[in-house]
Amino acid sequence: MERLADSEGPRDKTRAASQQCLGWRGMGVFLYLSIMAIIEIENLSKSYRVYQKQEGLMAAVRGLWHREYRDVHAVNDVNLSVEQGEFVAFLGPNGAGKTTTLKLLSGVIYPTSGTARVMGHVPWQRDNDYRRRFALVMGQKNQLWWDLPAQESFRLHQQIYRIDPADFRRTLDELADLLDVQKLLGRPVRELSLGERMKMELIAALLHSPEVLFLDEPTIGLDVVAQHNIQQFLRFYQAERKITILLTSHYMKDIAALCKRVVVITDGAIKFDGSLEGIIDSFSSTRLLKLQLAEGQSAEGLQRYAEVESVVLPKVTLRCQRSEVTKMLATILQQYEVVDISVEDPPLEEVITKLYQDSSAAPSISGTNKPSTEVASS
């Protein structure tokens, strides 16, 4: 396995540069470097050419000479800027281009067109200095040796990243303590539960103290307790270290618990970039009215004022337009005896689903995936 060559660290380079500058000019350079976006993506695209194999023996034989291909635009003209220390959620349905984007930013694959810079580096150039400053964790892929204890894989990571032994031991003890896995370090990875393995994967990714962390569905398949533990750890670690994190997840609780900024991507293109509250304000025109009726009060006739979501007396849930909430409540309070009222936004899952559906129904920025026919060389 390739070792990362020794190179001057980013803090040393910044310090050396500042020492060469004098007075206010040097201070200005330092401030500029401090506020510069840590991830910059411009018109980034990635397309794949997929062979369309037909069913049957004769079709397979014909495919030896005449093959039909389909162009898949996994990422299409994406523009994105992320500041240092941000915790950004990357949302989208399956096949939207989330994982492909993370692979591009990690340098795993090359783009079809466009540019990207992470901490000043072009990811697919795979500079050693860049590779020692980021980490990628994929919930469906393992980086630890299956039959060996996790601590053996950690030792391998120490050698790959050339981590000082004292720093390695201190970081490992800190992470193992935070994730409560001290007693599991000597157990083979194959004997660990899914949640325990994910904790070990996070430790392996953070041993070299990366400045940027890419997380691709880290809580997939985990139970509620394991999800909560991972969320708590990520929130604490990011707040303490101020690292930049891009997170993809299908669990809205992950997003609500961790991220203030949300980027929604569908069909390879960004459809929304803003706050979590902004998604609800932009893509949900209704509110939920939750009423607790007085004892003996009937719910009959409420459908005349708003859409009835559920009735489990004495509790009733209604849905109405945002602009009609005040008028609706005034009318209902005049006609019914109500003990308690709450006005809530629709569930985040519902709003995100509607956003996905609306984006799929709208004309795709990436255009249609037209099949092409090519004569195969024999």
Image: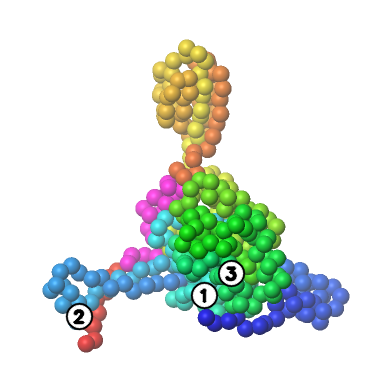
In primary-sequence order, the first of circles 3 and 1 is 1
Quick check: 334 left or right of 132? Answer: left
Going by the numbered disc 1, the residue's amino acid type is Gly
Quadrant holding the C terminus: bottom left
Give the spatial CA distance, label 2 vs label 3: 47 Å
Q: Is residue 342 visible?
A: yes
Q: Secondary structure at mark 1?
A: loop
- Quick check: 179 above or below 71? above
| Sequence order check, earlier mark of 1 and 2 | 2
278 or 326: nearer the eye?
A: 278
Q: Foreground residue, 180 or 132?
A: 180
Identify residue for label 2: 64
Which label is found at residue 154?
3
| Residue interval drawn in magenta | 352-369
Distance between mark 3 and mark 1 Cα atoms: 22 Å
Q: Nearer the viewer, mark 3 or mark 1?
A: 3
Q: Are marks 1 and 2 in contact (CB under 8 Å)?
A: no
Residue at horizontal 45 percent and vertical 43 percent from the top: 350
